[in-house]
Amino acid sequence: MKKAMKRTTVAVLTGVLAAGMLSGCGEKKLDGTQTVATVNGTEIPMGVLSLYARQSQAQTEAMYMSFMGSAANIWDQTADTESGETYGEQAVKSCLEQIELMYIMKEKAADYGVEITEDEQNAMADAAAEFMADNDEETIEALSVTEDQVKELLELETYREKIRQPIYDEAAIEISEDEAQQSSFTYVSISTSGDDLTEDDIATRKEQAQAILDEMKEDPEADMGETAKAQDESYSALSGTFFTNESDDEDMTSSYPDEVIEALRTLGDGEVYPELIETDTSCYIVRLDETHDEDATQSKMESLKSTKESKYYTETTDKWLEDAEIKTEDKVLETLTITDNHSFSMKAAEVEEDTETAEDTDADAQEDEAETADEAEDTDAEGEEADTAGDTDAESEETDTAEENTDTEE
């Protein structure tokens, strides 16, 4: 129990210190003591919302810098043409809603057996004090936040993290191996549509597809990728998985064309479908590798459970917001703006940990990495399939990582 508490304490400290080096400029003055909203009778001070909104702003801008190389012209663009609302204005409202939800979660924490320990309270108090010390007077004034409000936000975020798993447990999601069973297959997809293709081009591609199929029928165990490349260097074979059993559950549908899945379900392990499978945009050569792919099935069971737990969590918390008595002070809310000419940034801060705590944190990171490995593999594989745009079917490119386990090039 002591070990678990130390992990939680470090998580709180790390989160605050990372945001504790905020720097900003050009902020119009806020009054952090004003009440920006009331949730079930509890007043939300502007200082709490301001700090949370600036953290979110800084994180978003850092993400844009990382992926786009620039964080310019994010917030002032019009998001809703009818209302004229900007992305910055939407962001402020979204942050307020998240803060409101966290206050509700704090209310409901006892119902889920969630509490904050004395050690955690002390850690948050220390972190709040360090936050105030780490930031210069100008930044604190721009945020209009007090030390108590920093601690209050930390407490709210801690309740949010702690209540998540109990809500998942309440959902009691069980996924059977039968409903999640995955079959694996290998395929070549050759595009037969597009403005850049002439009738002769299409005819040639179909002839090549037939040649690949004929060779695979003669030797089903042959390397389909090499067989495809022998016809055209740009062709390649991919591997994928699909639900072995049909289901009406929207989370258990396939993103591959129906014609492909129907054909695969007629095959036994190692068999090549004897005909070209033609869709409106492509033709396919397919081989069923395993009717029951154990690894893919286990991965799908985990991803389905995660998807359904997340859906339950969202439905539950949305209902909490819907049922809550919330009053927003619009004039106060309008004083908080997120615009392109006013930026905040996060700077990494060092966190001192004792050896045991550092090891605990590393172990947690490894567990999280293991839990998301399958999803990362799905995403990478789908990107690989998208790169073969000249050869892949537009229908198969619209893949969902929660539904296809592997799309890796052989």
Image: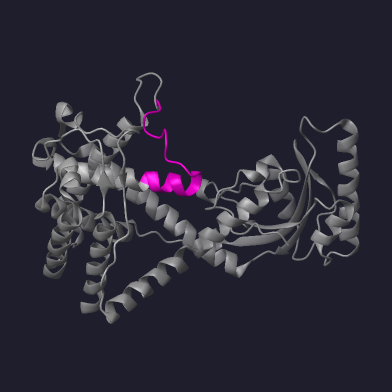
* Residue that sits furthest to the bottom in the current view: 356
Q: Classify residue 301 as left or right of residue 236.
A: left
Q: Where is residue 300? Give x, y as percent.
A: 53, 61
Q: Is residue 159 magenta?
A: no
Above or below: residue 176 compared with residue 387: below
Q: How is the image coloured?
A: one colour
Q: Where is residue 332? Give x, y as percent.
A: 15, 30
Q: Where is residue 38? Give x, y as percent.
A: 12, 37
| Residue placed most toward the observer, 210 or 175 | 210
Q: Residue at x 70, y 59 (%)?
A: 409
Above or below: residue 80 compared with residue 140: above
Report whether residue 240 is seen.
yes
Q: How many marks?
A: 0
Q: Classify residue 189 as left or right of residue 300.
A: right
Q: Classify residue 350 as left or right of residue 290.
A: left
Above or below: residue 350 compared with residue 262: below
| Residue placed most toward the observer, 285 or 202 | 202
Which quadrant is home to the C terminus? bottom right
Q: Is residue 74 magenta?
A: yes
Which quadrant is home to the N terminus? bottom left
* Residue that sits furthest to the top in the current view: 82
Start-end of magenta stretch:
60-78
* Quarter of the view holding residue 101: top left
Q: Residue at x 56, y 60 (%)?
A: 377
Q: Residue at x 81, y 64 (%)?
A: 223
| Residue placed most toward the observer, 165 or 230 | 230
Q: Where is residue 323? Give x, y as percent.
A: 21, 38
Report whether residue 49 is seen.
no
* Quarter of the view holding residue 144: top left
